[in-house]
Image: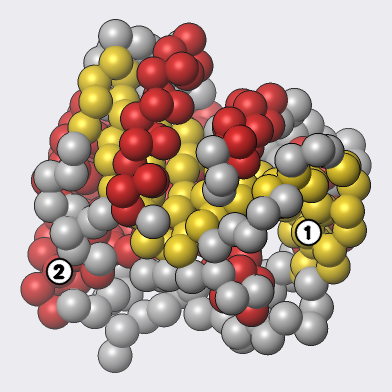
Amino acid sequence: MSLDIFKYDFNKGDDFLVDPIEEHTNYTVLKLSYKSPIETIYDENNNVISYVYKPKKECRRVIVFLHYLFEKVRLTQRILSLYFVAHGFCAVEFTLPYHLERTPEGYSSGELFLTENPKQNFEAYRQAVIDLRVLADFLNFKGIDKIGIAGISIGALVLNTLMGVDNRFKAGVSIAGGGGLHYIVSKGIKKPSVKRAYFGHYSDDPETVFKKVDADFHKYLKEVWESGEVKKPPEGEEWFLIDPLTYAKFNYPRNIIMINGAVDFVIPKNAVLEFREAVGNPPIEWLPTMHTTTALLLPFVFGKMHEFFEKQL
């Protein structure tokens, strides 16, 4: 029996709140909110907030934008939304758990999404995927089934898991993302406390630990991919259940393009290349950037995204 950690009760449209907040000549901005199926101890985080940019003319194509970790101002999402609404798309600025309006009092945006507690991180990531599935419920309720999605950094990782779980998201653009969370935690993330949280229960040296986890994960992937069913992971490795690679063969070949920095030290190249091969070798653009400097080439990125979504939606 396949293990489904992203299961939830389908939302029929009764619990969505839509409020107009901006009126412009060619488009309207709406605030969309709904309760997350995952109830946490933080009231702020339990209310999912998105902003919908809707052209005045009829729109049947939607692009959902996922921001990066620790996002505080939503600037990139806003620019993307204005760009795509000007080209006739609806655009949705989605808020990941524990970010922006969903940040609990006393914490900074994103602080509770990536912590020293693997269980907390697991549940935040899982919640992000489920909340996006509910967003698809809303769009389908409105008669929209041409849904694209784009994400940057952590948004791209969530996107890469989501598209293997829910095929209502027809096309995706993964920016500075990939798969293989153990690569990213062990080789990319610089915070020692996070590394210890994931690998501290092993007594060997870090390189030996990485090799063991890598072998265990790839054994697990082989079982999942060959059986077509998500299996229970080894004890202590529950994060296997949210990794984009686990779901790589559930939507294959994947209808995405990848845009990555050639000198990205946060998302190691192995995490990019292995995920790309696993989902069918989609097109990839290597930018002469690091992880955080991809934004410097946004005009190029916008053009690639627009060209892709025009063809695919």
SS for dot 2 = helix
SS for dot 1 = strand
Residue 68 % position (x, y): 56, 33
Task: Decide if residue 176 is on the left or right side of residue 85.
Answer: left
Task: Decide if residue 141 is on the left or right side of residue 256.
Answer: right
> What residue did someone put label 2 on?
225
The coloring applied to the image is secondary structure
Q: Residue at x 78, y 59 (%)?
A: 32
Looking at the rendered structure, which numbered label has been put on residue 271? Answer: none
For the question of whether residue 225 can be seen, the reply is yes
> What residue did someone put label 1 on?
32
What separation in Å lies between label 1 and label 2 (alpha carbons)?
A: 37 Å
Q: Along the line of sight, which residue is nearer the eye, 275 or 281?
A: 281
Q: Residue at x 37, y 12 (%)?
A: 290
Amino acid beneath label 2: Trp
Looking at the image, tell me whether mark 1 or mark 2 is earlier in sequence order: 1
